Amino acid sequence: MARPAASAGRQAQIAGLLLSALAFGCANQAAPPGGPPRTTPAAILSTVPESGAVVPDFRGKAVIQFDEVIDEAPGSSGGGGGGGGGTGAITGLAQKIVLSPVAGDVKVSWHRSAIHVQPEEGFKPNRLYHLEVLPGIADLRRNVTKTGTTIVFSTGGPLPQAELGGTALLWVEQRILTQGVVRAAALPDTVAYVTLTDSAGNFRLREIPPGRYRVWVVQDQNNNRRQDRREPFDTVTVAVDSTASAVLWAFVHDSAGPRIRAIEAVDSVTLRISFSQTLDPARAPDTAAVRVFALPDSTPVGVRALYRPAQFDSLQARARAVADSLKRLRDTTARKDTTARRGTPAPAAPRVPAAPGGVARAARDTAAHVDTARVRRLLAQRPVPYDRLVVQTTRLLTPGAKYLVRVRGAISLSGVAGDGVGVIEIPVPKPLPGDSTKTNKR
């Protein structure tokens, strides 16, 4: 009699398990896992310390907490992500973090949805820190942040309200400097606040102490946030009270003077000299500094005029414009004479209908003009540097002959003078097709 009771108990137990499994399956069907993929980039939930906080004797690491897991990126655990810069290129997440002012490297580490930042020297007391998160942080779905943010906190007194901004330009290239490393050190200190120029070449350091700052910008070609040899840079001293602005003109500084790199013939009386460095545009070319000699007996050839490339190109363009105008005038006169003889008016040019997007394109062109107007005004404040000089002689240069050209006291953008010497052989014009004036040896 006990067996039927046990069998009934086991059946009840099995039935209960089946009901539990069924209920669990129904619950899972009611709330399926996953959902639509996120299309917005990760957002910062919190920071330690908070922006604007005063945290005396702060120790440990600064933390930037995001609302989802971010991409670790190879090499992100390395140092060098801060204002001090390292000897090698900065890689991974460290590229997106700038901590300043610090004297050495910065440790940047990944912790799934958080970034930990710590200067190699530790956080110093009585210092105002800028922790800048640059655009470009990606999550695991490759959503990338388009804007950055800066966390400002103090390990001493209250936050100041002074501000320094400006624009960085590449002087020789005549364009804005994007992603340039800007450093501003309060004199006499050498530890600098650091930021990067944006896509418009602009930079801004908010909430810094008032004072006199040594400001410099570097075109960081090897991505180590340091000024290295042959990298264009500029520096200026700025007094910052409540707000100040600076324009920096970056170019390659060289301790050697310019040398002649090449000479080419433009026409029968014109030579173009290329230099090894860019010349100072504030110093007008002097005909007394350029001498031309016919070889082999070194007979002097007079120099009539010197031109910068832009001046010479303008003269050439003006001459071509005059020639084109005369040609059009002759063509117009000939057409009028032909029409008068025939007694029929010249047909009017057909009117081309405007494209549907013409108004929109015009609006975009106007907007682009407004966006670049300030940069053009800034570039117009200084003359354009040049590395070529056009020489016109007082007499014709003989085809096939060699000439020696000597330049004395050419001054580079760095203010260093140099002398140069070069030799050119004037090309012999090639005979035109069908030219019968040839010398035949018999």
Image (cartoon, grey):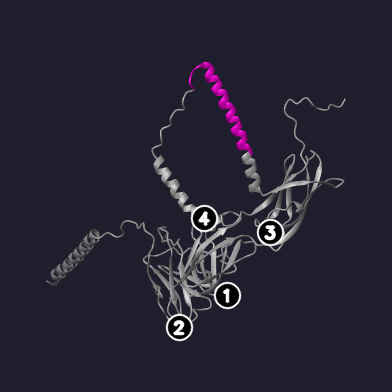
Q: Nearer the viewer, mark 3 or mark 1?
A: 3
Could you tell me the amino acid type at mark 3? Ser
Could you tell me the amino acid type at mark 1? Thr
Whether residue 175 is visible here, answered yes or no, is no
Disc 1 from disc 2: Cα separation: 22 Å
In the picture as drawn, the residue positioned furthest to the left comes out as 1
Whether residue 120 is visible here, answered yes or no, is yes
Helix, strand or loop at mark 1: loop
- Pick the quarter of the image with the C terminus: top right
Helix, strand or loop at mark 3: loop
Residue 98, x across and y down, in percent: 49, 68
Label 1 belongs to which residue?
190
Q: Nearer the viewer, mark 1 or mark 2?
A: 1
Label 4 belongs to which residue?
375
Label 3 belongs to which residue?
412
Circle nearer the N terminus (2, 3): 2
